[in-house]
Amino acid sequence: MEFLEEFHKAGWMCGWRGCTETYEGDQPTGRVNLVIYHAPQPVMDLARIKEWQHNKVFCPTHAAMLSDVLYPTGSDLEETEGSA
């Protein structure tokens, strides 16, 4: 727990290994969260997640890199279909 206390004193750091971008207070525009967990079925209520593996925030640069490697969903999928 001591590590977490020290980690959060510096603000929220980008979850990308080697990145030192941080922020304090409310999450700025352009940053995204990524939650990774295991459950037998997808969970819509985050409070029900029992096995958290990662709960990270990413800076705009690494958020864009993540977005580039993930399949499009939701509004991203609509934009992709509309541009074809």
Image (cartoon, rainbow, N blue to C red):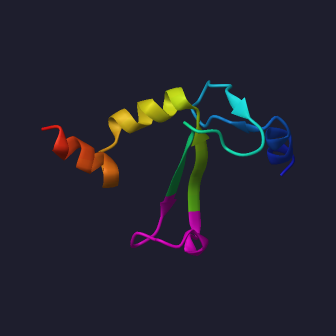
In this picture, is 2 found above or below 83?
A: below
Q: Quadrant of residue 84?
A: top left
Residue 27 place in picture, x, y as percent? 67, 43
Viewer-proximal residue among 79 and 69? 79
Q: Quadrant of residue 64?
A: top left
Q: Main secondary structure of the magenta part?
A: loop
Relative side of 9 to 18, left or right = right
In this picture, is 63 found above or below 76?
A: above
Residue at 54 percent of width and 36 percent of height: 30
> Does residue 36 show up magenta in the picture?
no
Residue 15 place in picture, x, y as percent? 60, 37
Residue at 58 percent of width and 32 percent of height: 59
Give the residue furthest to the left. 84
Residue range of the region highlighted in magenta in the rendering: 37-51
Relative side of 4 to 16, left or right = right
Residue 45 place in picture, x, y as percent? 53, 73
Give the residue furthest to the front. 82
Residue 43 place in picture, x, y as percent? 46, 71
> Does residue 40 show up magenta in the picture?
yes
Residue at 56 percent of width and 68 percent of height: 46
